[in-house]
Amino acid sequence: MEWRGRRQSDNVVDRRGQSSGGGLGRNPFGRSGIQIPMGGRRGGGLSFGTIIFLVVIYFVLKAMGIDMLQVLGDGNVGGSGSGYEQSIGRNESSQGSDDTTAFIKVVLAETETTWNAIFSGAGETYEEPKLVLFSGSIDSACGMASSATGPFYCPADRQVYLDTEFFDQLETQLNAAGDFAQAYVIAHEVGHHVQNLTGVLPEFNRQRRSMGQREANQMSVRVELQADCYAGIWAKSADKEGILSDGDLEEALNAAQQIGDDTLQKRSQGYVVPDAFNHGTSAQRMKWFKRGYDSGNVSACDTFSGAI
């Protein structure tokens, strides 16, 4: 992918290294932080029992090699710097971190160019989303999320969230290497933003309240496949701009294949449960990304009519 030297978006917000204050979850939607009940008085002080509890916890952690006084002082657990919050570029000092950030900014800028043109052509104004980089965990308007959540879009604040560690997982765990595979992931989440602006996500969330789990999963698949199709539209636009290199399209299609529900379930548990699919099979994800790329037209991305 020929991305160097191109315009970088101003809509990337780097919150890596900032503690989000707790709470982990696989699903950011409706997720709240983990609450630790603190007994005792309501007037703001700690009860005697709570103080004793905290003292015991302090010495237990100290015996494990974790000095909480040091943690509160400098933010490092055990001083090892091995956790997500410690290992992902604090000050963007390394060349690798600079390259990753620049790459993300360029990809987001290219999605802005694509969707501004499409919306303008329809007589509408495209509201550009923010893309928030985080490490470890993040507190979004959709609730708490961890790195395990993967990249996600939050309709409540209209922002895309990405832990850049996911790019390593994409290559080493999901067998989907390549910069254009990474770009596809970003373009897919931006596709959800487009769905939010056009009313698809609000309508889905409204209908989902009256659906059973199986029906909601089936509708979710259609939503996700449309986002894949929108990512394909962006890929077509990027190709016209001369950004794609040989093999880029294959990288994106391979990524779509590797993150299909059936492929992921086979990899994790050895068998598939179709009723639990909520993103689409590998074949479906490849099909709809390719449809968006081949057509370059939003009208080709109607995943809500007929078979998918």
Image (cartoon, helix red, strand yellow):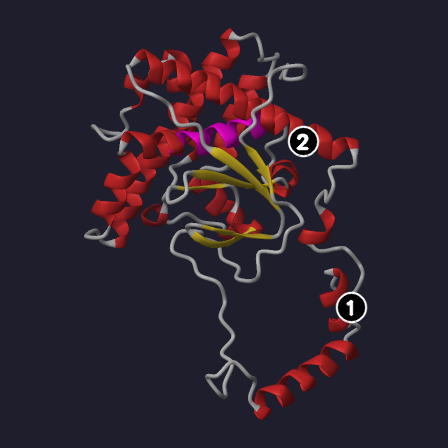
Helix or strand or loop: what does disc 1 sit on? helix
Say which residue appears at 23% left-offset and 52% top-offset.
Answer: 209
Quadrant, the N terminus: top right
Q: Amino acid at mark 1?
A: Gln
Q: Is residue 49 above or below residue 103?
A: below
Q: CA distance from mark 1 to mark 2?
A: 31 Å
Q: What is the span of residues highlighted in magenta in the rendered image?
A: 180-192
Q: Is residue 227 left or right of residue 132?
A: left
In the displayed orientation, state which residue is furthest to the front. 43
Residue 100 bears which disc, if any?
2
Q: Amino acid at mark 2?
A: Thr
Q: For mark 1, does the 10 Å Cα neighbourhood hold few (<14), some (14 to 19), or many (20 or more) residues?
A: few
Say which residue appears at 69% left-offset and 85% top-offset.
Answer: 55
Residue 157 bears which disc, if any?
none
- The answer to whether residue 233 is seen in the rendering is no
Q: Foreground: 15 or 89?
A: 15
Quadrant, the C terminus: top left
Q: Which residue is mark 1?
A: 70
> In this rendering, which labeled residue sits more in front, label 1 or label 2?
1
Q: Is residue 97 above or below residue 59?
A: above
Q: Is residue 277 left or right of residue 81?
A: left
